[in-house]
Image: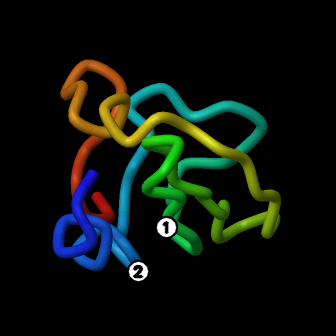
Amino acid sequence: MTATRAAKWLGSAWTAKRPEDGEKHFVVKEVIPSRGRVVLEALSTRRRFEVAWRELEDGAVWLSGWR
């Protein structure tokens, strides 16, 4: 992941297509370019976890923005 691309991910909003534990809306809080990962934070619980940024591009799992 390039630095330019990483900057575009930071602060972006995401909606899980299959919410778990009431967590549906997320925001990217940190980008780890060297590992190709981002840290997501659930808006409802503030729980954080890492996912590969490529997972966010899977339309069967994630939607860009909050819906």
The dot on residue 28 is 1
Mark 2 = which residue? 11
Give left or right: position of 21 versus 51: right
Inter-mark Cα distance, 2 to 1: 5 Å
Percent of width and height locating residue 55: 37, 29
Percent of width and height locating residue 9: 31, 67
- Residue found at the very far top of the displayed protein: 60
Tell me the quarter of the picture where residue 14 sits.
bottom left
Colour style of the rendered protein structure: rainbow
Percent of width and height locating residue 38: 51, 53
What residue sits 66% from the left and 64% below the top?
41
User: Which amino acid does the dot numbered 1 rest on?
Assistant: Val
Q: Residues within 10 Å of mark 1 (few under 14, many from 20)?
A: many
Q: Secondary structure at mark 1?
A: strand
What residue sits 79% from the left and 69% below the top?
46
Name the quarter where the C terminus is drawn. bottom left
| Mark 2 and mark 1 residues within 8 Å of each other at the beta carbon | yes
Vertical order, 8 against 16 (above or below): below
Q: Earlier in the sequence, mark 2 or mark 1?
A: 2
Frontmost residue, 56 versus 66? 56
Vertical order, 55 against 38 (above or below): above
Q: Residues within 10 Å of mark 2 (few under 14, many from 20)?
A: some
Tell me the quarter of the picture where residue 62 sits.
top left
User: Which amino acid does the dot numbered 2 rest on?
Assistant: Gly
Q: Secondary structure at mark 2?
A: loop
Vertical order, 12 against 57 (above or below): below
